[in-house]
Amino acid sequence: CEKPDARPLRQRLLVVANRLPVSAVRKGEDSWSLEMSAGGLVSALLGVKEFEARWIGWAGVNVPDEVGQKALTKALGEKRCIPVFLDEEIVHRYYNGYCNNILWPLFHYLGLPQEDRLATTRSFQSQFEAYKKANQMFADVVHQHYEEGDVVWCHDYHLMFLPKCLKERNSNMKVGWFLHTPFPSSEIHRTLPSRSDLLRSVLAADLVGFHTYDYARHFVSACTRILGLEGTPEGVEDQGRLTRVAAFPIGIDSDRFIRALELPQVQEHIKELKERFAGRKVMLGVDRLDMIKGIPQKILAFEKFLEEYPSWCDKVVLLQIAVPTRTDVPEYQKLTSQVHEIVGRINGRFGTLTAVPIHHLDRSLDFYALCALYAVTDVALVTSLRDGMNLVSYEFVACQDLKKGVLILSEFAGAAQSLGAGAILVNPWNITEVADSIRQALTMTPEEREKRHQHNFVHVTTHTAQEWAETFVSELNDTVIEAQLRTRQ
Ligand code: ADQ
């Protein structure tokens, strides 16, 4: 017979993010099929044994009827997920509008929307109202499920209004907020009409986290310059209350990638890829098809490389895997056409009857195919114009312990601060510099590659997603205890 569970009770962690880590497909009036998605955040939190995590978020589907909502809530409950139901109108103004049309571009230094972009949704103010309303709806669900002692961890730019909503309902709730994108310079944040409301709301959290010290510093200076508050080495102080602000660089579940390389299905993919590209060096780009990822700039740099170093033309291939994202937004549709046009032109210019220099796929790859691609790659090209961290660069390094390929990495990705010593850092806007770095990577000595790889491999395998999550939550617990001690003194 089974022994009784001897584990001590674990602290409950409520992870609140815009999207739940499952995709839901309706099969009937009261039946749903659910598939767990394996994103970085999911594996980070699955690996954390110290806490009992529950997820709160939008399931990504519109469920107007009560029968459907009840059935979905029940099905999600089995996966420790709790849905927030948002109707289409709110999703349009909150998610497509304020989150993706305003905050996302602004936080990546692409500025506020010009009139044509604004016209695609409604006015700024109406989008902000929807944003606040959606955040209130998330707060309602958190409040309903909260038990004393829980830790509430809010994620990303979708939920900047949430810390305030939560604390207004229960000032004792332990609330952390983490931003996955960059936090821009205060000069950029200043242009946002709702700049103060958002900062004040985030400051209601006990702990505020970013991927890098630069983002944390930008946030603190936005609070000092825009709100006139005091920045301290620990964070931001407002009338004696301290909000702790710090950097918590995310990582990946590196073991999952390393172990996958041994699997027969991955080995089979590796064999096929090696045969397919025999005699050619493989360069790889893996990105969501988003303007921040700098895909057109990357492809133009590759063209420049072929132009400058024509002897490489039939000895190298660039595989660009781009997952379509936000496909109903005109700007993203324009980006897709632009990328197709450039790829077509370059393949027409440098291709032969038997081979083309660029293979561009507009789709997602499954985990095993992705691992195999990372493993056979000689040079990975990550040329984001801005990126909070960029996990693709980490995943590539994790899969390269045999090959010791080279990572070319944008200096504007957060990852440049952790993998900079092993990668070749580039300014993605400088196409000539990127072209030269491609040549440098392809001709690098094995000793140099080994040295650079080793540096990054140690980082990726020691700074994991699990460690990131554990550090954030234990820091949040400590911050709250310290604050309680301070108020008692
Ligand atoms: P993203 O912008 O989504 O994340 P990134 O960190 O690179 O960017 O993560 C992308 C994930 O999607 C990776 O796990 C990658 O394997 C996967 N992926 C990308 N293209 C794929 C494809 N074609 N097929 C299959 N899988 C693909 C946001 C921020 C980042 C930050 C993360 C985590 O924008 O800067 O690093 O959150 O905080």
Image: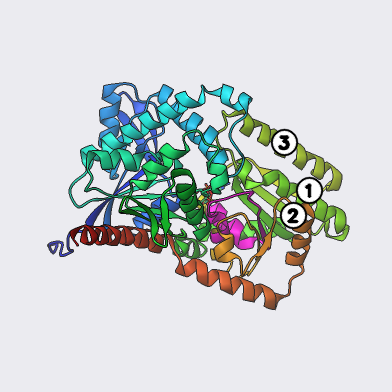
How many angstroms separate mark 3 from mark 1 (CA)?
Answer: 19 Å
Q: Which residue is mark 3?
A: 338
Are the residues tagged 1 and 2 within 8 Å (C-beta)?
yes
Q: Is residue 376 magenta?
A: yes
**In the rendered view, does 425 fall on the left or right side of 34?**
right
Drawn side of residue 319 relative to residue 26, left or right: right
Q: Which residues are magenta?
A: 368-394
x, y (%) of residue 40? 45, 53
Disc ID at residue 317: 2
> Looking at the image, is mark 3 or mark 1 nearer the viewer?
3
| Residue that appears at 39% across and 51% down | 42
Q: Residue at x 38, y 31 (%)?
A: 132
Front residue of 118/376: it is: 118
Residue at (86%, 53%) from the top-left corner? 307
Does the rendering let one see residue 49? no
Per the model, the C-alpha gap separating discs 1 and 2 is: 7 Å
- Considering only order in the chain, which callout, 2 or 1, is on the residue closer to the N terminus? 2
What's the residue type where badge 2 is placed? Val
Q: Quadrant of residue 82?
A: top left
**Residue 306 appears in which quarter of the rendering?**
bottom right
Q: Position of residue 191 (x, y in %)?
A: 55, 37
Q: Give residue 218's position: percent from left, percent from top.
A: 51, 52
